[in-house]
Amino acid sequence: MSTGGTIGRPLHPIHIVSNLTLVRRRNALALFQEFAGSAITEGVAPKGLEQSFAARAQISPSMWSQIKSSRPIGDKLARQLEHHGGKPAGWLDEDHGEPAPPDTAEERFVTLARAAWQASNARQKRELSRLLKQAAGSELE
């Protein structure tokens, strides 16, 4: 067992599990971002991407919602998400550090969004914000 911040004091096993839970959740969200970015690049509307991702991973939309917020991802579910996300076994368990830099499609979107924002009046900016928040789901509320 490894030692914690206090010298000679071992970390409780829950700290290790907690870290793995956070890493798996972060990586599951990265899988979704990869899926969504690819779908949007192909012209798929953002609405319904959460449900499409859940279907591809062969889990219910409700379970995906729980995973995003608080549900721990067990070993079997981790391997399932990796398999359906095209990742090698164990990928969800590894800390991949900072997210990958934005791809060209994301850069184009950000440029377009910035231009739309700058060309908008106050009412249009509120509407743009509302639409983006709606597309992002509850993450930005």
Image (tube, rainbow, N blue to C red):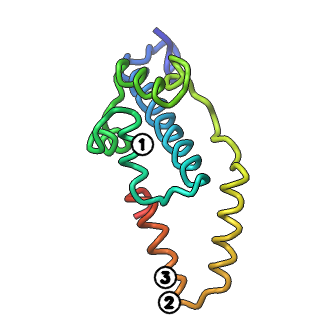
In which quadrant of the rendered image does the C terminus lie?
bottom left
The residues bearing labels 1 and 2 have C-alpha atoms spaced at a distance of 33 Å
Vertical side of 61 occupied by 4: above or below: above
Residue at 63% across / 41% down in the picture? 99
The three-letter code of the residue at mark 3 reads Arg
Q: Secondary structure at mark 1?
A: helix
Q: Earlier in the sequence, mark 1 or mark 2?
A: 1
Of residue 135 and residue 45, the one placed in the foreground of this image is 45
Q: Secondary structure at mark 2?
A: helix
Disc assigned to residue 123? 2
Residue 60 picture location, percent across and down:
28, 39
Determine whether label 3 and label 2 are within 8 Å by CB. yes
Of residue 17 and residue 76, the one placed in the foreground of this image is 76
Residue 130 picture location, percent across and down:
44, 74
* Residue labelled with disc 3: 126
Extreme top residue here? 1
Determine whether label 1 and label 2 are within 8 Å by CB. no
Residue 11 picture location, percent across and down:
43, 18
Residue at 50% across / 22% down in the picture? 93
* Residue labelled with disc 1: 53
Foreground: disc 3 or disc 1: 1
